[in-house]
Image: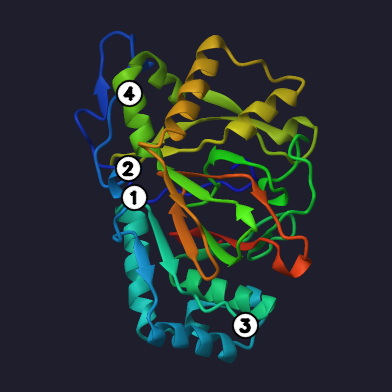
Amino acid sequence: MGEDVRPWAIRGCGGRRGKGWWAEKQTAGEGTVGAMAVAEVLGPGEWLGAEIRDSDAWRVRLDDRQRQEVLSAVRAAQPAPGEIARESFPLPTLGPVLRRVREELVDGRGFVLIQGVPTDGMSERQCEIAALGLAGHVGGIVPQGPDSAPLMHVRDTGADPARGQTRSYEHSGRLGYHSDPTDIVGLLCVRPAKSGGLSSIVSSVAVHNELVRTRPALAGLLYQPWWHDRRTGDGPDSFSTKPICTPRAGGGVSMTYGPDYLRSALRGAHVPPFTDAQQEVMDLLDQLTNDPRFALTMDLREGDMQFLNNHVVLHGRTAYEDHSEPGRRRHLLRLWLTTGPAR
């Protein structure tokens, strides 16, 4: 969220057309955007953490044969990690499973947790190859950062989160709920923290619908322009406006949200302060995303690989305490994916 990559629209789990997803109104009023009324969205992308917390439906546990396939593909991979492709990372039995993972991400709940990736004993480069090889069966790799890296190493670099331009993956502080700016984000856990660092997700469709049901007058503001901070510097190019929610072709909603990047946009000299209504919307979104009824928390362990659809899932992280030894510190690999052609 906030990083300078534009999302690409995908079909599926943002929901289907509900009871007049966009309903024509003769006069603008409560819960309207211009002459259009904001309505609830139906579909499998709407779920509550409290209802699926104890389910195994969103977990994929690799068996011994699938783990061996990953190890064999990693050993056989000769190119640099940035050149790993699905064709050069054969997974005879796991490949079809990963295709079903993609279907669940696009047309289902919008998230999957894969458990048992055999990272134990792998070098850092081998972990990179494993992450890229697995992700390549789910979507096209999207380069990240100023160097267009195929993946990003998520670890505490000692950066101060209070600084406006600090990236969220560079510190150990709490991360508010947000979405990354691509179709899919994948995280492979190489090592967990000493304590904390829990991943928490919510259905942005469920949050959207709750706001429509309970505060329709404010729900329309989600579709109006908001200032966002790209954190690319102090000049005007670092700031841009876009809605938090946008309708998706064929029905559904895509939410682009990150309170830290909305608040840090206020550092721009030309960016106005939040209106009272905008502040109320943000307070409500923070309240809903942190509600245990909506949230699903995952304690990512070594070998866990989480995939999230950024259009319909928001994710956050608790603060964490790390080990003192560098070789034991929390380390995740982040991948950005598109479900369309790779860019």
* Residue 68, percent from left and from top: 46, 88
First in sequence: mark 3 vs mark 4: 3
Residue 227 falls in image quadrant = top right
Name the residue carrying label 4: 212
Farthest residue, direction left: 19
Residue under pointer 1: 53
Tell me which numbered mark, 4 or 2, is placed earlier along the sequence: 2
Nearest the viewer among 59 and 38 is 59
* Residue 120 screen position, x and y as percent: 58, 79
Does the residue at mark 2 contact the one at mark 1 (Cβ under 8 Å)? yes
Q: Quadrant of the N terminus?
A: top right
72 above or below 301?
below
Residue 121 bears which disc, if any?
Answer: 3
Query: What is the C-alpha distance between the residues marked 4 and 2?
Result: 20 Å
Count neighbours of disc 3 (C-alpha within 10 A) and say few if under 14, some if 14 to 19, many if 20 or more.
few
Task: Give the residue pinned by disc 2.
Answer: 50
SS of the residue under disc 3: loop
Q: Nearer the viewer, residue 77 or 118?
A: 118
Residue beneath the point at 23% across and 37% down: 17
Q: Position of residue 98 (x, y in %)?
A: 38, 71
- Proximity of marks 4 and 1: CB atoms separated by less than 8 Å: no
Which amino acid type corresponds to the residue marked 3 in the rendered image? Gly
Q: Earlier in the sequence, mark 1 or mark 3?
A: 1
Instruction: Locate residue 337 relative to residue 234 in the image: left or right.
Output: left
Residue 34 vertical placement versus 192 (above, below): above
Q: Earlier in the sequence, mark 4 or mark 1?
A: 1
Q: Position of residue 279 (x, y in %)?
A: 55, 17
Three-letter amino acid code at disc 4?
Val
Cα distance between the residues tagged 4 and 1: 24 Å
